[in-house]
Image (cartoon, rainbow, N blue to C red):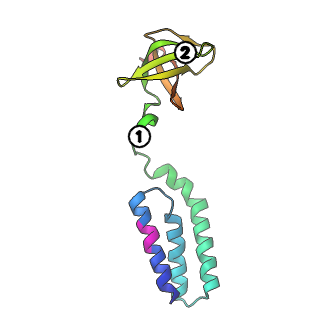
Amino acid sequence: MESVYWLIAFVALAGIEAATMALTTVWFAGGALAAFLMSLAHASVNAQLTVFAAVSFVLLVFTRPWAVKHVNRHAEKTNADSLVGKQARVTGEINNSLETGSAVINGQEWTARAQKDGDIYPVDTLVEICAIQGVKLIVKKVQEEDR
């Protein structure tokens, strides 16, 4: 009888994974499938639970790093993350000591700070976005060969 519950769990977990593609429930779906097969072999409930936990753990630990690296690797970054690596133009002198600076990219003006504290970038300097911290762009000057 518990085979029905494992089958329902497998279908639900696989369905959630298919809907989200977040690589969160697929590992447990594998564990539920293994437990389902154990229930078909008339294993005890304790054995089924043990197999579910063990298979889920093994899949999570040993296959997740590979899956994260290879699945959805061509997904386009969204929102602010997509700006990292792009170039912006300084619209207000960037000086970390004075806590000033702004840059514009894609028609939007952002507060900006230099990646290195001692660097100062005057207006119209072309900079590369290295990171985003909160609502601030962290930038470095674009070298001539990068243009």
Q: Is residue 32 found inside the magenta-colored segment of the image?
A: no
Figure quadrant of the C terminus: top left
Q: Is residue 12 found inside the magenta-colored segment of the image?
A: yes
Give the x, y percent position of residue 99: 58, 16
Q: Which contiguous range is marked in magenta?
A: 11-15
List the single residue furthest toward the left.
Answer: 107
Q: Which mark identifies residue 113?
A: none
Q: Looking at the picture, does residue 102 appear above or below residue 65? A: above
> Viewer-proximal residue, 140 or 106?
106
User: Amino acid under label 1?
Assistant: Thr
> Viewer-proximal residue, 134 or 33?
134
Write the residue at 49% across / 22% down: 111
Q: Looking at the picture, does residue 137 appear above or below residue 40? A: above
Give the x, y percent position of residue 100: 55, 15
Write the residue at 41% across / 40% down: 78
Which sits earlier in the primary sequence, circle 1 or circle 2?
1
Q: Residues within 10 Å of mark 2 (few under 14, many from 20)?
A: some
User: Quick check: 84 left or right of 120?
Assistant: left
Element assignment for label 1: loop
Write the residue at 59% across / 82% down: 48
| CB contact under 8 Å: marks 1 and 2 | no
Write the residue at 61% across / 88% down: 44
Which residue, given by chain and number where applicable, does mark 1 sit on? Answer: 78
Q: Which mark identifies residue 100?
A: 2
